[in-house]
Image (spheres, grey):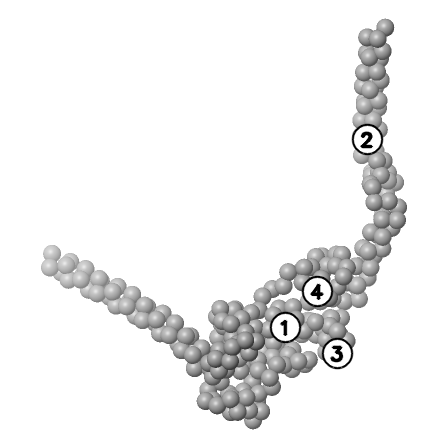
Amino acid sequence: MIEKKSGLAVFICAMALVFAVSALGQKNASQHKSGAAKNISCVTCHKTLGGELAKPVAEWTGSVHQQNGITCNMCHGGDPAATSMDKAMSKDHGFIGAPHGQAQFDACGKCHATEVAEYAKSIMGKAYLEGKGGPSCAKCHGAHHNAIPEVPQLCKSCHKDTTGFDQIDPMNVTEATVQMLSKMKIKLGEQKVAGTRPSVVPKIKEDLDPYVIGLIAFGGSIFVFILGYIIYLILEKRD
């Protein structure tokens, strides 16, 4: 009996130790994350500046980047541990400010290499790199509070006509994509010219197979027979 009690006591003590260590680890991890954010001079400084200069920190806080430990210097360069603005934003420490063009692709590509490589080959990605109006990564995903954009709602900020945009891959717009959208718009235009009201009789040759045509013909015959019979009964009552 004593041995059983001793074994139970040892088991309880071991489980208590495991839970204690686990809780301590979680606490330390939480403190490390919060402490890391507090020790970033960029965050500390911009918070005190207020207005538009504080906006990036407000947007970054709680974002997927902040949750995964992506700090300001990973995209903007500089020294996040420096105690003065001159040192924190020193080019000697790699400070580049807001990355544009290839520099932005390089910054995003550190974590999203596959996506950036695919987008860089697309029509929109090439247009951005060549300065011809293509959207950057930050334009669609946000610079600090990053999110997956809603397509085609977001596209309306640049495109008046977003017909078919919900059927394409915005990260990989190719010549084939453009041709598909053009054909779709042409078809809609032809339908509009022909009349916005749908035809009562469908285009049998294009839209229906022989079996469906037979069913429609049979149904039409039944309808005409019933309508004729109703008219006959009405005329009989009048007589």
**Mark 3 and mark 2 in contact (Cβ < 8 Å)?**
no
Q: Single out the mark in the foreground, 1 or 2.
A: 1
Q: Residue furthest left?
A: 2
Residue 161 lies in what quarter of the image?
Answer: bottom right
Residue 26 lies in what quarter of the image?
Answer: bottom left
Q: Which residue is mark 4?
A: 157
Amino acid type at mark 1 = Ala
Q: Residue at x 79, y 63 (%)?
A: 178
Q: Which residue is mark 2?
A: 216
Q: Single out the mark in the foreground, 4 or 2.
A: 4
Mark 1 Cα shell of 10 Å, populated few (<14), some (14-19), many (≥20): some
Instruction: Report x, y in % for residue 142.
Output: 61, 70
Q: CA distance from mark 1 to mark 2?
A: 54 Å
Q: Circle 2 — which element?
A: helix
N-terminal label among 1 and 4: 1
Q: Circle 4 — which element?
A: helix
Q: Is residue 119 above or below residue 6?
A: below
Mark 3 Cα shell of 10 Å, populated few (<14), some (14-19), many (≥20): few
Instruction: Report x, y in % for residue 215.
Output: 80, 30
Q: CA distance from mark 4 to mark 2?
A: 46 Å
Residue 131: mark: 3
Looking at the image, residue 172 sits to the left or right of residue 67; the answer is right
Q: CA distance from mark 1 to mark 3?
A: 15 Å
Q: CA distance from mark 2 to mark 3?
A: 57 Å
Amino acid type at mark 4 = Ser
